[in-house]
Image (cartoon, rainbow, N blue to C red):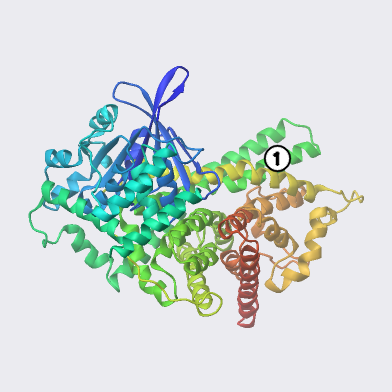
Amino acid sequence: MSAVIVAGVQVRRIALAGNPNCGKTTLFNALTGLRQKVGNYPGVTVEKKTGKFFGHHGEEMELLDLPGTYSLQNRSPDEKISCDILLGQRADTPRPDVIVAVLDSTNLERNLYLVAQIAEMHVPLVVALNMVDLAESKGIHLDLAAMKDALGVEVVPMVATKRVGLIELKQAISRAKVTPAKQPAPMPPVIEAEMEILRGLLCARGRVETARAEALLLISGAEHADPTLDKAASESRKRIRDAGLDPVHDPVEARYAWAQAIVEKSMRHDDAHALTWSDRLDVILTHRAWGWVVFVAVLTLMFVSIFTVAQYPMDWIDAGVSALGEKIGSMMAESDFRSLVTDGVISGVGSVLVFLPQILILFFFIGLLEDTGYMARAAFIMDRLMSKVGLHGKSFIPLLSSFACAIPGIMATRTIENYKDRLVTIFVAPFMSCSARLPVYALLIAVIFPPGQVSVWAKAGIMLAMYLLGIGAAFGSAWLFKKTLLKGETPMLLLELPPYRMPVLKTVLINMWQRSRMFLRRAGTVILALSIVLWALASYPKNPNADATPSEALGYSAAGRIGHAMEPLVKPLGYDWKIGIGLVSSFAAREVFAGTMAIIHNVEYEKKKLSPKLIDSVRADTWPDGRRVFTPLVCIGLMVFYVLALQCMSTVAIVRRETNSWRWPLFQIAYMTGMAYVAAFIVYQGGRLLGW
């Protein structure tokens, strides 16, 4: 194991390992700041986060944030990725030079279990003892000298949220090495003997440093590419069982015994039965009734903020886009190219970018809720409802992630061990209203309510109703799947409630920006390309009649012909052919609907000299007989359609990758689109029968 050489300078590779909710991400952000890269490990859907920071002596270091995991047992993709990296078995990721194990001081015994496994890897180790301030507030006293003596490695007390201990951590990383004092957890004699047999085989294959760890993994049931080793491991497991031991559970118990012994030496608790302020707060936030009240109140506050705080920057962006279009248009002679630039590119992309402030606020709230520890409480109260429809409590995190984007939400289902439960969660995750739907909702709500007619609470209420409709559709569909296609019992939820913490603004802002970059990338790639294509379809072929009205000219174009061809299909929903084009284009990305409406209306109304603002143009749209197209009933039905329909090719691709089959994503498209059509039909036709 050696550090990488970059431009003649040695760069050490450091990896952060730790349980979920231990503050690992906060520490990663504190060390790297904005010098981060986020992607996926090749061949899998596990997130890979890397960054750079400077060590104690100013030397550059590469930092890798390993997936948060409680163990390295290879039971999930997260565990396998972490284990393979620590063993140096991934060609795309070199083995780290130093491991920093981040521990939650308030849950020391559970966190030390992972340290026990890392200690078996024979790699330099530093323990970052995080949240020592919370431990002290709970009456937990830590003897750092005793812990360092027991572990045989550097132990650094830290408060990552306040950047306390960063300098000491960098010093410890610089000094880190494999020391003789660091002893892994001892195993029962029978297992130790079998490990020696397997170690000998592994050492003969050049796996000297990691032989103990790999031998234990083989004994616990891990597979190996070498059939000889697989056979030897199978024989070892048989002999262990013959001796009355369990090759899986006994190593686990041995590690916990090792962790418990260290805790007894290095930790003292004043009063284990005293209620903390966090416990008292949980009495309310996890209450059967008050928990739901708080949960809905938090969501309502978020949506009100989306419509109030975001309005000012949205107006600035809207004015800037309009000014840019007018400025560039005035500098160019009247031509098709000018129309492409102003009506296609600037109008199409700008009409989507204007909703960026609302998306930033959405991600800001999600970041706050995650950083404070409230998300786990939301999962707890939601589990009561989710269990009634057959969903696992662990499904809440993927579903919650889907409010930002269905792609990471579907990827997060890999933490669900049961395949049927995982498949059900994948099926219903796209019902959660992702950030891409936000521009559609905001546009249609603005069309329903002209400025000054209703309070922001009414707008927030409609937005909340759309989100709740998605949640209801997800739960109802999950119940149906669990009763029919994917029958199975719902396993019990085992969930850790992390302590409440003050959010770190820098961490929240970094996460907010990272999540919003996907939206901006799509604006600069997918939406830009589609804007050009849609402008071309709406502009060509040109009507040979020079006296044709704008509507006739647009109807003669390729987009008009496509729209008119599909209008009989969407007219029962109250939609005209222009909305039909918007629905089709949305299958590339939902937010494209706003850009499509901007392009079509700019092309059609260019000669009418109407307001260039998208909302005004859409509100003024009419049928040939003069009736408004975007009535409140049509807008509500259209929002319902967008809540329920799977209009995102990226999501379809991820479902194909996660399920390794085209059968499931095609089924998902069919049932969600069918449900959306039926629901929108009921809203429109039912509303007309009621005289709305």
Q: Is residue 40 above or below residue 561?
A: above
Q: Residue at x 64, y 52 (%)?
A: 592
Residue 542 image offset from top left, x and y in percent: 87, 48
Q: Residue furthest bottom?
A: 689
- Badge 1 amino acid: Thr
Task: Locate residue 338 relative to residue 524 in the image: left or right.
Answer: right
Task: Locate residue 567 relative to residue 190 in the image: left or right.
Answer: right
Q: Is residue 330 above or below residue 89?
A: above
Q: Residue furthest top?
A: 8
Task: Locate residue 487 relative to residue 397 in the image: left or right.
Answer: right
Whether residue 551 is visible, yes or no, is no
Residue 110 image offset from top left, x and y in percent: 25, 54
- Viewer-closest of 427 and 621: 427
- Secondary structure state at the residue bearing disc 1: helix
Across the whole image, how many numbered discs are drawn on residues? 1
Q: Is residue 419 above or below residue 614?
A: below
Q: Residue at x 24, y 43 (%)?
A: 130
Residue 439 image offset from top left, x and y in percent: 56, 54
Are there few (<14), some (14-19), or many (20+) residues within 10 Å of tag 1? many
- Viewer-closest of 606 and 233: 233
**Mark 1 = which residue?**
342
Whether residue 166 is visible, yes or no, is yes
Residue 544 image offset from top left, x and y in percent: 92, 50
- Viewer-closest of 185 and 293: 185
